[in-house]
Image: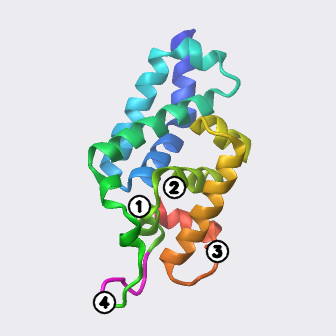
Amino acid sequence: MRDDAFRAYFERHHDSLSRLAYLMTGSAEAADDLAADALTEVWRHWDRVTAADDPAAYGHGILMNLARHWVRRRGRERLLTLESFRRRDSDVPAILDVRGALRRLPHRRRACVVLRYAFDMPEKEVAAVLGISVGAVKSATSRGARQLAELLGDGTKPRFDDGWEAAR
């Protein structure tokens, strides 16, 4: 029974976990590994997962933690400073795609923007997945969307309904 229930969970959520990992890390190779690692953790803690109010959110939370650790291990967050976000004519490409811009967002903003817009999660669910308040989700999402617009260079709020397929 446990095997069948986990298999159904795996089939239902593997693709979503992999897409989320890709959007958080920008690496297709890491995305598959992180999704597999997250599902391994789901299996290890299956009793907690099934007891959770939202088992899918529990799995997304595991994935987000794994992605955060992956990014930290590679030192990306040390490279992301406010100085790197300043626009200079000589070192800012004319066109930035959604993936490139997402990689430049700080982890929490990236997580909130991806979960809210790419996965269409309500703020309350994003808060549960990330372990933060709804107010923090609202703030990080707003700042992340504004920062994305700046990085994309058009000064307007990006249209997430058009660009997510290309970002996957």
Question: Tag 4 or tag 3, which sits nearer the N-term?
Answer: 4
Which region is colored magenta? 90-96
Rendering quarter of residue 41: top left
Q: Position of residue 112 (x, y in %)?
A: 59, 51
Q: Quadrant of the N terminus?
A: top right
- The residue carrying mark 2 is 110
- The residue carrying mark 1 is 103
Q: Is the C-beta separation of discs 1 and 2 under 8 Å?
A: yes
Q: Residues within 10 Å of mark 1 (few under 14, many from 20)?
A: some
| 115 drawn magenta | no
- The residue carrying mark 3 is 157
Q: CA distance from mark 1 to mark 2?
A: 8 Å
Q: Residues within 10 Å of mark 2 (few under 14, many from 20)?
A: many
Q: Is residue 36 visible?
A: yes
Rendering quarter of residue 155: bottom right
**The disc labelled 1 sits on which kind of residue?**
Arg
**The disc labelled 3 sits on which kind of residue?**
Lys
Which residue appears farthest toward the top when viewing the image? Answer: 1
Q: Is the C-beta separation of discs 3 and 4 under 8 Å?
A: no
Q: CA distance from mark 4 to mark 1?
A: 20 Å
The local secondary structure at tag 4 comes to loop
- The residue carrying mark 4 is 90
Q: Residue at x 31, y 89 (%)?
A: 90
Q: Residues within 10 Å of mark 3 (few under 14, many from 20)?
A: some
Left or right, residue 95 beside residue 1: left
Question: Tag 2 or tag 4, which sits nearer the N-term?
Answer: 4
Q: Is residue 122 visible?
A: no
Q: Position of residue 3 (x, y in %)?
A: 51, 13
Question: Tag 2 or tag 1, which sits nearer the N-term?
Answer: 1
